[in-house]
Amino acid sequence: MLISVSHVRVSPDLSVARVHLSIFPSAQGPELLANINANATAIRYDVAQRLRYQLRRTPELTFYIDDSLDYIEHIDELLQTDKPADKPATDNSEKEDN
């Protein structure tokens, strides 16, 4: 199992941080996200200990699943499927003048 932080969005007043996680394999994503959100206060405490001299206030952490890799994979699958055969080109140069 691999969990990585894909990006973090912090509010302008630094009170809330939205952390987007990329989880592989994605089938276990919702279960892991629930576990991570249950431990958000402990994670915030650890972040506060590391950043205590750099930030006046540690933001509240909320975690989300980043499904952009699943979306990219789905688009690739759609592009790899066989396309229907194109219609034969018609020759428009032989138009009759009326």
Image (spheres, rainbow, N blue to C red):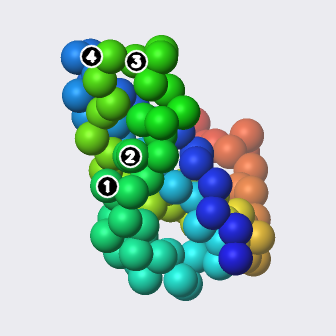
Left or right of 89: which side holds 11?
left
Label 4, label 2: how far apart the Cα atoms are: 18 Å
Q: Secondary structure at mark 1?
A: helix
Residue bearing mark 1: 41
Name the spot of residue 31 as percent of width and height, x first.
Answer: 43, 82
Left or right of 36: which side holds 16?
left
Q: Could you classify mark 4 by the number of other residues whose Cα lies within 10 Å: few (under 14), some (14-19), or many (20 or more)?
A: few
Q: Secondary structure at mark 4?
A: loop
Tag 2–tag 1 contact (CB < 8 Å): yes
Q: Residue at x 37, y 65 (%)?
A: 39
Q: Earlier in the sequence, mark 3 or mark 4?
A: 4
Label 3, label 4: how far apart the Cα atoms are: 14 Å
- Can residue 64 be seen? no
Identify the mark at residue 16; answer none if there is no mark.
none
In the figure, residue 6 lies in which quadrant?
A: top right
Identify the mark at residue 12; answer none if there is no mark.
4
Residue bearing mark 3: 55
Q: Secondary structure at mark 2?
A: helix
Name the spot of residue 42 as percent of width and height, x first.
Answer: 39, 57
Q: Secondary structure at mark 3?
A: loop
Label 1, label 3: how far apart the Cα atoms are: 17 Å
